[in-house]
């Protein structure tokens, strides 16, 4: 019902007739329903949270430069540990990759004027800043949640009750935001493509967002259920996860990982979508294996719902479950490998332009293969039991989340910044950013694998002196990563104000978002575009007569 | 509805203008959302089943469930789903009075259901904290009750809006339709819940 007023809103804002040329700066601080404004709101807030989470990481690494606890109190260390993970996942990668790129690009890529439910979209965004505020508040009311981003009971029920409660509420809010956003993406992609665009003519980013949304839709509510139960246990005297009163902590782990394993696909599938857009444009070649990439996203989405117990191999899990979930986990590597090989095949023989966007995309390829392989090792129960809860796990997931997701977000920013702002980012500065990030990532996260193999547990502020050397190396890497964001933020702010004018299509890309102005006008096009060629028809002789994989286009629908 | 798009002057008359006035997608959006919502209940049901499977005595002696009142409540809620359907059928025939009548009856039945739930809570010999079963019992029924309450607010919202002339008609009846779909959802969840907590635990 609420939607009835929504749709009227943009026209009212514009006085009923015509459009303002563009939004004023203060429109970005209001409850605006334009998908582009919301996309920018998501991106800017998530990049701010990235700094906050990064700052916590730097403090933790400073603490870990020496084996003793001599910089942060153990409680504060735990609070930073918990909130670093929470912020980086729920307020940085998820809102940047899904909320930011998804909202900004989906309507532009499918030729729609906005999302299907603009007001719902704005509500979904505005759930995020208060969630961040709650996490910040948790530091002032009891020193921050202490139980890690997984918040396993009984630890989460016996430490810092009020901060833990705030933490649960914050997670329910970002979860709700994620569900509302997914409803919007699914309905928009399903129903609002330009009539001339068939499913298999969509850019691959849209396919990735379909898979992401389905996953978020089915997994997130289960996290909400876990959070509600945890809230009741902490505040209302129930005993769902209290073993002494008949409860069962492993039930929490099941509920939590039923969401939180798919959550890693939520963080990587949109990035895969970004990869599939950036690589063909800068390699000047049609994407290799359009359908394989599209369907492998859906396969990851489906199989990804049945692998969660691989986080629980040491939780007294029955042997048959270990076998089942080892197999299902290893199966996920297949569709992921299909994508990797397709991108490599796209690069093969292309006229590669080493733009910063492309450097980050290629950097992601190498990083993700490394992180993916360590993921396969962890998926195998016998090995996992050996390294469970050690730095090997930390090294693995930072490789896929930093070397994967963050590289992908950077790549996407360098690629679409001209579209979003109308100005180019500075390329030399971007390359400095890339080199620092690349070196910093390797230096920070590679030694963690060795530390884990040697038995250093994760989540500790103090460690055995024998691990000091490698830890100092990791800390140096972390400082390099901290420095690496300086040229980036400077570049973004400076280029946004003074950068070179980009024009509508600086990369000579073929997807639909490049057919409108940069930045796009409100409601995206004066007249909606008609699809004349596939999204990746690079180097084709008759570009307007071929589909994504080079075959003739099917007859456009009505 | 979704008028932002059709009022764009430049867009009219163009060959793709059929798309400009895109269909009302709110019903589809609601159904997508309810799929997600159902998974949340599924999470709670799973917890209930896991505990059931691991306990020798479920429910324990001191927390037996009462059956008569919930059975009457079930009857009320299930039949209210039929009543609300009569309401949307009426508005599809442009019978506003009929819609208001049936929606009013549905709202009354929903309110009776909630009152019955509260009465049941007050007359049970145990509370939320008594034991694991009562934890689950109050959480599941309470969470469902919250959804009944939301459905009730939606129905009352439709009734409130129907005062405006021509707000709902045989052409524009998405609001009542969505309220109906939500009400059916609440009903279906209750049937699962009733079967699980009240009936199957008897065996």
Image (spheres, rainbow, N blue to C red):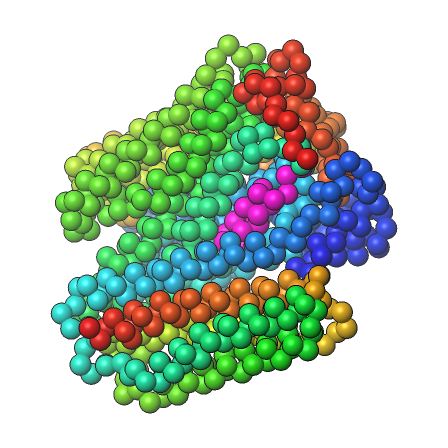
Q: Quadrant of residue B105?
A: bottom right
For the question of whether residue A217 can be seen, the reply is yes
The correct choice, above or below, for B187 with respect to A308 in the image is below
The correct choice, above or below, for B136 with respect to A270 in the image is below
Quadrant position of the C terminus of chain B in the picture: bottom left
For the question of whether residue A483 can be seen, the reply is no
B101 horizontally vs B128: left or right: right
The correct choice, above or below, for B105 with respect to A369 in the image is below
Dominant SS type (magenta): helix
Going 44% across and 43% down the picture, which residue do you hit? A266
Residue A185 at x, y percent in the picture: 56, 46
Quadrant position of the N terminus of chain B in the picture: bottom right
In reply to whether residue A184 is colored magenta, the answer given is yes
Q: Quadrant of residue A168?
A: bottom left
Going 51% across and 28% down the picture, which residue do you hit? A275
A472 horizontally vs A411: left or right: left
Of residue A291 and residue A407, the one placed in the foreground of this image is A291
Q: Quadrant of residue A147?
A: bottom left
Going 65% across and 11% down the picture, which residue do you hit? A541
Q: Residue furthest right?
A: A17
A86 horizontally vs A450: left or right: right
**Magenta stretch?**
A178-194
Residue A302 at x, y percent in the picture: 38, 41
A116 horizontally vs A49: left or right: right
Residue A83 at x, y percent in the picture: 41, 53
């Amino acid at each position: 019902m609420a939607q009835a007023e929504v749709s009227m809103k943009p026209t009212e804002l514009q006085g009923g007739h015509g459009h303002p040329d563009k939004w004023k700066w203060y429109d970005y601080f209001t409850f605006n329903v334009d998908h582009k404004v919301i996309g920018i709101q998501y991106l800017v807030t998530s990049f701010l949270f990235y700094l906050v989470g990064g700052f916590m990481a730097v403090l933790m690494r400073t603490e870990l430069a020496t084996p003793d606890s001599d910089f942060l109190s153990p409680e504060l260390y735990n609070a930073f540990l918990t909130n670093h993970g929470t912020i980086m996942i729920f307020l940085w990668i998820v809102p940047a990759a899904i909320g930011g790129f998804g909202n900004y690009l989906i309507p532009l890529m499918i030729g729609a004027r906005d999302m299907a439910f603009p007001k719902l979209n704005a509500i979904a965004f505005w759930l995020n800043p208060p969630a961040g505020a709650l996490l910040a508040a948790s530091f002032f009311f009891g020193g921050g949640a202490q139980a890690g981003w997984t918040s396993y009971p009984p630890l989460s029920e016996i430490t810092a009750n009020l901060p833990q409660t705030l933490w649960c509420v914050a997670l329910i809010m970002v979860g709700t935001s994620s569900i509302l956003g997914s409803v919007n993406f699914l309905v928009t992609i399903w129903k609002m493509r330009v009539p001339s665009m068939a499913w298999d003519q969509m850019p691959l980013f849209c396919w990735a967002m379909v898979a992401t949304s389905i996953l978020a839709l089915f997994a997130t509510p289960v996290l909400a259920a876990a959070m509600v139960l945890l809230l009741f246990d902490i505040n209302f005297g129930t005993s769902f996860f209290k073993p002494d009163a008949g409860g069962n902590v492993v039930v929490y782990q099941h509920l939590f990982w039923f969401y939180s394993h798919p959550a890693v696909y939520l963080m990587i599938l949109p990035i895969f979508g970004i990869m599939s857009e950036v690589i063909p444009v800068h390699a000047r070649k049609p994407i290799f294996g359009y359908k394989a990439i599209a369907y492998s996203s859906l396969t990851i989405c489906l199989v990804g719902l049945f692998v969660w117990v691989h986080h629980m191999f040491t939780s007294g899990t029955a042997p048959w479950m270990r076998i089942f979930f080892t197999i299902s986990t290893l199966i996920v590597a297949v569709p992921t490998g299909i994508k990797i090989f397709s991108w490599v095949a796209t690069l093969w023989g292309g006229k590669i332009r080493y733009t910063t966007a492309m450097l980050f995309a290629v950097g992601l390829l190498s990083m993700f293969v490394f992180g993916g392989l360590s993921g396969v090792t962890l998926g195998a129960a016998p090995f996992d039991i050996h390294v469970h809860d050690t730095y090997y796990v930390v090294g693995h997931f930072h490789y896929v989340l930093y070397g994967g997701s963050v590289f992908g977000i950077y790549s996407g920013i360098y690629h679409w910044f001209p579209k979003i702002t109308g100005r180019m980012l500075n390329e030399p500065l971007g390359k400095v950013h890339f080199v620092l990030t690349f070196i910093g990532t390797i230096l920070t996260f590679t030694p963690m694998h060795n530390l884990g193999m040697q038995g250093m547990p994760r989540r500790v502020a103090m460690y055995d002196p024998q691990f000091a050397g490698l830890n100092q190396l990791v800390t140096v890497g972390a400082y390099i990563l901290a420095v690496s964001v300086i040229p980036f933020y400077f570049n973004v702010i400076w280029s946004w104000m003074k950068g070179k004018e980009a024009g509508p299509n600086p990369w000579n890309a073929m997807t639909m978002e490049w057919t409108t102005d940069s930045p796009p006008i409100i409601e995206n096009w004066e007249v909606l575009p008609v699809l004349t060629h596939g999204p990746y028809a690079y180097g084709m002789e008759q570009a307007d007569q071929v589909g994504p994989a080079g075959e003739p286009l099917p007859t456009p629908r009505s | 509805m979704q008028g932002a798009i059709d009022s764009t002057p430049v867009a009219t008359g163009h060959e793709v203008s059929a798309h400009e006035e895109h269909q009302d997608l709110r019903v589809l959006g609601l159904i997508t959302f309810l799929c997600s919502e159902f998974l949340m209940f599924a999470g709670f049901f799973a917890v209930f089943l896991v505990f059931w499977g691991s306990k020798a005595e479920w429910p324990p002696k001191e927390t037996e469930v009462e059956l008569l009142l919930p059975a009457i409540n079930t009857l009320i809620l299930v039949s209210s789903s039929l009543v609300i359907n009569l309401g949307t059928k009426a508005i599809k025939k442009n019978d506003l009075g009929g819609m208001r009548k049936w929606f009013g009856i549905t709202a009354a039945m929903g309110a009776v259901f909630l009152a019955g739930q509260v009465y049941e809570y007050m007359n049970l010999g145990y509370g939320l904290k008594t034991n694991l079963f009562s934890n689950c019992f109050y959480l599941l029924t309470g969470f469902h009750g919250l959804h009944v309450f939301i459905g009730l607010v939606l129905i009352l919202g439709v009734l409130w809006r129907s005062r405006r002339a021509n707000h709902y008609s045989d052409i524009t009846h998405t609001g009542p339709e969505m309220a109906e779909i939500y009400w059916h959802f609440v009903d279906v969840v209750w049937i699962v819940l009733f079967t699980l907590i009240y009936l199957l635990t008897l065996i």
